[in-house]
Image (cartoon, helix red, strand yellow):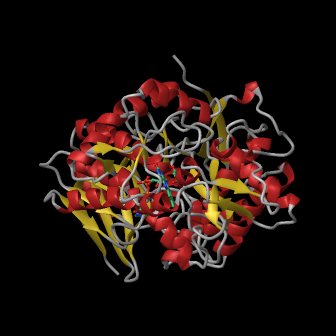
Amino acid sequence: MDIRVIHCDYLIIGSGIAGLWTAIHLPADSKVAVVTKSGLRESNTEYAQGGIAVALCPMDTPELHKQDTLEAGAGLCDEPAVDVLTREGPEAVHELIDRGAQFDRRNGTLLYGREAAHRTGRIVHAHGDATGAEVERVAVEAVQGMEMVTTYEHTAAARLLIEDGECVGAEAIQFPSGQRLRFVASSTLVATGGVGALFMYTTNPPVATGDGMALALQAGCTMQDMEFVQFHPTALAAEGYPKFLISEAVRGEGAVLINNEGRAFMRDYHELADLAPRDVVSRAIHAEMRKQGGEYIRLDFSPIPQARIKERFPGILEGTRQRGFDPLREPVPVTPVAHYMMGGIACDLYGSTTIRRLFACGECANYGVHGANRLASNSLLDGLVFGKRAAGRMSQLEKLATDKRRRAAGRPAEPIAAGDEAWCEEIRRVMWEEIGIIRTGEGMREALGYLTELCSRIREEIAPSQAAMEAANMARVGRLIATAALAREESRGAHYRTDFPHPREEWRRHILITLQPGGSLGIDYRPVATY
Ligand code: FAD
Ligand code: SIN
């Protein structure tokens, strides 16, 4: 099939909050293409529940928000990045409101929810527990109203086009037709979200296969802190993929985790009890489940008045009931699951990657803001703040439309990937068991051997289907995560290994990984940025 060539000024890959917010802020007289693998709204953003953390409440300040973010990040946040997030956050949320986002209010005043490891209520939320859907609605409506933006749904970016060390666009495939598209762009932004789908149990929708990270790695980008995968403590322990999330905001309102004797156990593990940082709660649940012979921990909603549950958590109430559990009647079974990727494509504070004219933003990017453990509800804010910044930097770059670049359009495509879709299940199992909540050196070495072997097979075959392409990307990103996790010989934040169970000062640094000629992965280090 012929390759269709599309010229644009800016190519945005991904239609979650990071991609769309960037698109919205690009110059109105430019030509913007947004490609997205599924429908426009299908993304992690769409399913976000708890809300957006932002220092808007009169008792709060960006400095306090910064302190909480740094503490949760377990010594690995870059302070300048956290400053940007927390200081620019209020303006970003005001802009979202100006664009039509309906956050919950009482008597016209915004309501602020409480979540783990926040010292104060600072989470704005919409329709109780459907913040992500509201944010995505506003962003989608905004881009749909912009003549400059053309959206391409069911179109998966499959390869970044690099010429003379610069990114000149990307090649994409439309599924199921198999039509190939070549986008030739002055600047390209990767905003493809997270990696939850690499793990057997996750809150993330199936689109979260780490594609953008795999593409960036293959293109020569440096990747940062890939060992830090956040496991959310409380997904509903019911059949089905992905696992249904029970927001941390539920514990913020007073719900408690109990073991099979009905005892609230979190105070045994941390002074903040049920509102301890996510990594602490996830490991505590894991430990209690082991003590109970694998039986699930339960979340008891009864400390929250029933009227409040109905008002604040309508979606969670409906979702748990649909799956056969009723939190108004009895505690519901919960389990930790893979939720968020702290690591990603290494960027500066404007989303510039190590390749010119290639930018990254949102969950697939790493500007050092979340450290070893993201603070609850800081991710939507990340997409807003850094999306706008990336748009600013992208539009400052001179517009490139040289003949040389246009000629890239004529080049034949290389095979993208290869594989057997059955890999996916095995990758999910290996990632869950060996690179999961509790890690061991031996298990990670085995996983790395398996994933490296898979990657060596990828280059030899051609993958005509979306599933095979995703399998290849999952193997590549899984190998990255395993490499970084094995390299970090300590436990910190979300990265916990039994052979090195404590933080070590000499490991208070970022791990950088790049693909070497010949296919091996090179490791380097960078100190944490402070003032
Ligand atoms: P996403 O929103 O995941 O968007 C990525 C986009 O890239 C998607 O459109 C996807 O289809 C597309 N894509 C992927 N691969 C390709 C490809 N090859 N080609 C083209 N397109 C591609 N965070 C908070 O701050 N507050 C919360 O309350 C909260 N709750 C959450 C609840 C759930 C259930 C989940 C899963 C996450 C939650 N998070 C929350 C995290 C937050 O939602 C995400 O981290 C954030 O929305 C990521 O935004 P993003 O734009 O970077 O990625
Ligand atoms: C939640 O609502 O518990 C998820 C919030 C987040 O991931 O930040």
Nearer to us in this view, 527 or 207: 207
Residue 69: x and y in percent read 54, 33
Residue 284: x and y in percent read 76, 49
Nearer to us in this view, 493 or 284: 284
Q: Is residue 239 above or below residue 397?
A: below
Q: Is residue 411 above or below residue 276?
A: below
* Viewer can see residue 502: yes
Q: How many marks do you count on the picture?
A: 0
Nearer to us in this view, 231 or 127: 127
Residue at 74% x, 25% y: name it: 505
* Quadrant of picture, ligand 1: bottom left
Residue at 46% x, 61% y: name it: 307
Residue at 32% x, 69% y: name it: 181
Horizontal relation, residue 283 to residue 140: left or right: right
Horizontal relation, residue 344 to residue 1: left or right: right
* Viewer can see residue 394: no
Residue 235: x and y in percent read 62, 63
Horizontal relation, residue 467 to residue 169: left or right: right
Q: Is residue 150 above or below residue 464?
A: above
Nearer to us in this view, 376 or 393: 376
Residue 118: x and y in percent read 54, 37
Q: Quadrant of the N terminus?
A: bottom left
